[in-house]
Image (spheres, helix red, strand yellow):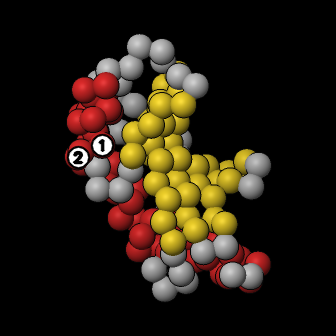
Amino acid sequence: MAFWNKKSLFDKLNKYFKDNNISIDEIDEAYSFELSFDKFNLFPYFKLNDDELNIIINLKKDSNLNNKLINEINLKSKFFTLKNKDDILYLEYNTFVDSDNVVDVFTKVISSINEFEKELEKI
């Protein structure tokens, strides 16, 4: 897809953020925002590459990761996969979107994090 589609997708997400009073920051061709929970905050970032939406949430740098907890979260999560790379624990989701569904997909994916908030507190 062309640059125009990427701009159109970002414009729709940007309108969603403005309508919901969520501020986003641009960092190295990615966009970051804040999610607040009772006991912690997360700072997801997303990238739009043509028609692909990538959402990543860095959680913790840790070399002693509990594999049982990782599996628990991966089984419970509808969208995200909990991964470990270079002792960085992070959630990742990748999907294809278009201008008709980008806001709906984004909203569902981000709100799904609430479903496994208790497990994230254990990390």
Q: Residue furthest top?
A: 64
Q: Is residue 1 left or right of residue 91?
A: right
Mark on residue 76?
A: 2
Q: Is residue 38 left or right of residue 22?
A: left
Q: Position of residue 119 (x, y in %)?
A: 26, 33
| Residue 21 visible in the current orientation | no
Contact? badges 2 and 1 (CB < 8 Å):
yes
Reading the image, the residue beneath label 1 is 74
- The three-letter code of the residue at mark 2 reads Lys
Q: Is residue 13 left or right of residue 114?
A: right
Which residue is at 46% across, 54% downward? 93
Q: Position of residue 38 (x, y in %)?
A: 31, 34
Which residue is at 41% across, 13% downward? 64
Q: How dense is the environment of label 1, judged by Cα within 10 Å: few (below 14), some, or many (20 and up)? A: some
Q: Position of residue 65 (x, y in %)?
A: 38, 20
- The three-letter code of the residue at mark 1 reads Asn
Which residue is at 25% across, 26% downward? 68
Mark on residue 65?
A: none
Quadrant the C terminus occupies: top left
